Image: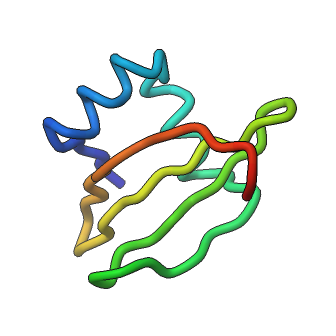
């Protein structure tokens, strides 16, 4: 499945030093997923003592990453 990134997601990834590899790994092998607003999905990947959260939209054969951030709570 093809993964694209919004300008916002790319800016947040650059600012937070999160790589596309980390994002793609979190989407393909998440710690868990949950539904979000507007029909989007949250993928969470545990990395040490932090969690990487990815908000994305899955439509047809394309995943669009909306935002990405680190958190201490899942």
Q: Give coordinates of residue 34: x percent, y percent.
A: 59, 76
Given the current orientation, which residue lies at the most extreme right position? 49
- Relative to 5, does residue 21 appear above or below in the rendering? above
Q: Residue drawn 71% across and 65% down?
A: 32
Q: Give coordinates of residue 24: x percent, y percent.
A: 50, 39
Q: Residue drawn 26% across and 66% down?
A: 61
Given the current orientation, which residue lies at the most extreme left position? 7
- Relative to 57, does residue 13 appear above or below in the rendering? above
Closest to the observer: 57 or 71? 71
What kind of colouring is applied to the model shown?
rainbow
Q: How many numbered circles does the render carry?
A: 0
Q: In the picture, which quadrant includes the C terminus?
A: bottom right
- Relative to 64, does residue 42 appear above or below in the rendering? below
Q: Residue drawn 32% across and 84% down?
A: 39
- Relative to 52, does residue 42 appear above or below in the rendering? below
Q: Give coordinates of residue 51: x percent, y percent.
A: 70, 43
Query: Which corner quadrant of the image does residue 56 belong to?
Result: bottom left
Query: Which corner quadrant of the image does residue 1 belong to?
Result: bottom left
Q: Give coordinates of residue 15: x percent, y percent.
A: 36, 18
**69 left or right, relative to 70:** left
**11 left or right, relative to 74:** left
Query: Which corner quadrant of the image does residue 49 belong to?
Result: top right
Q: Residue drawn 26% across and 30% down?
A: 10
Closest to the observer: 32 or 50? 50
């Amino acid at each position: 499945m093809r993964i694209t990134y919004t300008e916002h997601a790319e800016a947040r990834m650059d600012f937070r030093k999160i790589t596309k590899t980390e994002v793609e790994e979190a989407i393909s092998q998440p710690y868990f997923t949950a539904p979000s607003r507007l029909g989007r999905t949250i993928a969470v990947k545990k990395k040490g003592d932090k969690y990487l959260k990815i908000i994305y939209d899955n439509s047809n054969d394309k995943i669009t990453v909306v935002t990405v951030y680190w958190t201490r709570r899942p």
